[in-house]
Structure formats: structure tokens, C-alpha cells
Amino acid sequence: MDNVVLLGMIAGAVTSLGFIPQLIRGYRTRELDDVSYYMPIMLAVGMTLWLLYGVFVEGLPIIVANAFGIGCCLVLLVMKKMYSHSS
Amino acid sequence: MDNVVLLGMIAGAVTSLGFIPQLIRGYRTRELDDVSYYMPIMLAVGMTLWLLYGVFVEGLPIIVANAFGIGCCLVLLVMKKMYSHSS
């Protein structure tokens, strides 16, 4: 595999996995009050645009990482909605 | 400007700006307990790798967006350290 694609794959994996600790913490504590609604919303919108960018430049790691990231943002959003006491 | 570069620029701007509401919320409430330490740490590491990827593929929007994102993650990390009561 191309080294640059490999680098992108690793970058995408690390960035995507970055949301997992937040999801685990939220699931454990049932508290996501301190997390802003706008962060996952804007990240999901931005990552959707990145995904399109990835399609145009044919950057597979960009597509895969952002697809996973969008999923994580949506899960975070649903969890915050479920657990939050205030907005 | 190339439409694809423009798309990447917009994607990068939206994704980067996604951290701003979280920073504002943290600054206002002085509460970031529900934010996992590992999220900004892993995102900063991942975005550093994305930045390198951007350098290799000469994707200017990738470089700019991730440089800004890394800065936001570091600010979030410092704020969490300053405001947090628990780990």
C-alpha cells in the first residue's frame, strides 16, 4: 500500500477512535451536560463535507474516517439528548 | 479556485469551528467534567497525522483545518485541566 494512504488510514483511525472514550465516559456516567450540542452537530456537518471532499479527491482514508466519525457524532448527540438535564 | 479545494476549505472551516461552541460553553460554565480527557488528546494526535497527510498530498485545506483543530484541542485540554474537579 502507498505510504501516504497508510498514513491517512492511521490518522483517520486515531481521529475516529478519539470519540470512543467520550462515548464510553458518557455511557458510564450518564452525564453529558458539559458537552455542547453544537460540537457534534457541527462536526457531523463538517465531516459530511470532508467525506464529499474525499470522494472527489479519491482519498479512501478520508472517506472511511469521516464516515465513522459522523456515526460517532450522531451516537454522541443521541446520548446527550437521552442523558441531559439541561440544554 | 478549484471547486474541490473550495469544498475542502468549507469542510475544514465547519469542522474546525465545531470546537468553538464547546470552548465557549466550557469557558462560560467552568465545567468540563463530562468531557473525556482522551477525546482532545486522541483528536490532537490524529489531526497531527492528518496534517502530515495533507502535506504529502499537498491538500491545503487539510493542512489549515487540522492546524486549527489541533490548537482548539489543546485549548480544550488546558481548560479541562483548569476547571475539572475529577479526572
Image: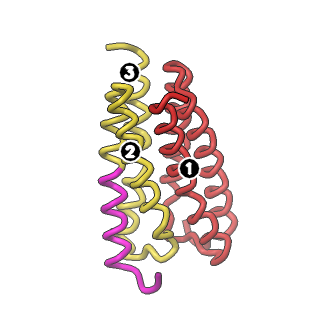
Chain colours: A yellow, B red
Q: Are marks 1 and 2 on the same chain?
A: no
Q: Is B51 positioned to the left or the right of B28 in the image?
A: left
Q: From the image, which quarter does the N terminus of chain A lie in?
A: top left
Three-letter amino acid code at the position of disc 1: Ser
Q: Residues within 10 Å of mark 1 (few under 14, many from 20)?
A: many
Q: Nearer the viewer, residue B54 or A52?
A: A52
Give the main secondary structure of the magenta stretch.
helix
Three-letter amino acid code at the position of disc 3: Val
Three-letter amino acid code at the position of disc 2: Ser
The answer to whether the residue labelled 2 contacts the one labelled 3, judged by CB atoms less than 8 Å apart, is: no
Query: Residue at image x 48%, y 53%?
Result: B39
**Residue A5's mark?**
3
Label 1 resides on the chain identified as B
Q: Residues within 10 Å of mark 2 (few under 14, many from 20)?
A: many
Label 3 resides on the chain identified as A
> Is disc 2 placed on a helix, strand or loop?
helix
Query: Residue at image x 40%, y 30%?
Result: A10
Of tags 3 and 1, the one toward the viewer is 1
Q: Residues within 10 Å of mark 3 (few under 14, many from 20)?
A: some
The answer to whether the residue labelled 1 contacts the one labelled 2, judged by CB atoms less than 8 Å apart, is: no
Q: Is B5 positioned to the left or the right of A13 in the image?
A: right
Residue A12 at x, y percent in the picture: 40, 36
Query: Residue at image x 59%, y 51%?
Result: B73
**Which residue occupies the extreme bottom position in the image?**
A85
Task: Tell me which corner region of the image, top left, top right, bottom left or bottom right, holds residue B84.
Answer: bottom right
Label 2 resides on the chain identified as A
The answer to whether the residue labelled 3 contacts the one labelled 1, judged by CB atoms less than 8 Å apart, is: no
Residue occupied by mark 1: B16
Q: Which span of residues is magenta-colored?
A: A70-87
**Residue A16's mark?**
2
Q: Are marks 3 and 1 on the same chain?
A: no
